[in-house]
Image (tube, grey):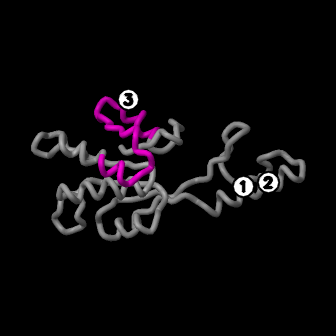
Amino acid sequence: MVNSTEIWVDKETGVNYLYHACGNSGGLTPLLDREGKWSAQAANDYMNTILSSHSTSAGNMIELIICNNDGMAEGAISALNSAGYNLGTDGSRSIPVFGVDATDAARDLIKSGKMTGTIKQDAVGMAEAVVKIAQNLVAGKGTFDDVVGDLEGTWRVNIPYSAYSG
């Protein structure tokens, strides 16, 4: 898993949730890059390091890659391509790679068969929530009155994501 804890430390969602869930499953060994820094280059470097010690012949090949953003997924895919994986051709070896943001580059990688999927953030829903919160504050209403989303306590609203796989 290529993760960056530099900014995002919410262990209830996303990659951090998966990391904690995998660590408690008894059957999976998560490899976590805590220095991802949201960078394609850092993810590429980390994946190259991992691939130097994990292989099919050694019986410890990586089976799944989940990244906190699509740029990091691109970096991981670049390293996999260099090792002969995820080439997007019939019969090529492939490891499922997932990212977050549904960028145009990620969508192209999915279409070409090099990436498995990404998570699309609802930018319109997020903007609508911010505008509604601002309107509520100006009008003296409750902060989250009529805000669409899942409220968490008194300080956060979660806007649902959606999957994109091509």
Question: Gap between marks 2 and 3, in whole Å?
Answer: 41 Å
Residue type, mark 1 in image:
Val
- Counting residues from the N terminus, which is met first, the one under dot 2 or under dot 3? 3
Q: Residue 50, located in which quarter of the rendered image?
A: top left
Given contact means CB atoms under 8 Å apart, are the residues at marks 3 and 1 in contact? no
Q: Is 20 part of what is drawn in magenta? A: yes
Q: Secondary structure at mark 1?
A: helix
Q: Is residue 15 above or below residue 97?
A: above
Q: Which residue is mark 1?
A: 130
Q: Are marks 1 and 2 in contact (CB under 8 Å)?
A: yes
Assign the N terminus to one quadrant of the image.
top left
**Within 10 Å of the Cα at label 1, are there few (<14), some (14-19), or many (20+) other Cα atoms?**
some
Q: Nearer the viewer, mark 2 or mark 3?
A: 2
Q: Residue at x 80, y 49 (%)?
A: 145
User: Residue 122: x, y in percent?
Assistant: 58, 60
Provide the residue span drawn in magenta: 16-45
- Which corner quadrant of the image does residue 129 belong to? bottom right
The part of the image, by quadrant, that contains residue 93 is bottom left
Please report the residue visible at 25 percent of the width from the left and 46 percent of the height from the top. 63
Question: Label 3 is placed on what type of residue?
Answer: Asn
Q: Would residue 18 be counted in the magenta stretch? A: yes
The disc label shown at residue 134, or none: 2
Distance CA(mark 1)–CA(mark 2): 6 Å
Counting the numbered discs, the total is 3
Residue 35, numbered label? none
Query: Between marks 3 and 1, how big is the CA–CA gap?
Result: 36 Å
Classify mark 2: helix, strand or loop: helix
Dot label at residue 24: 3
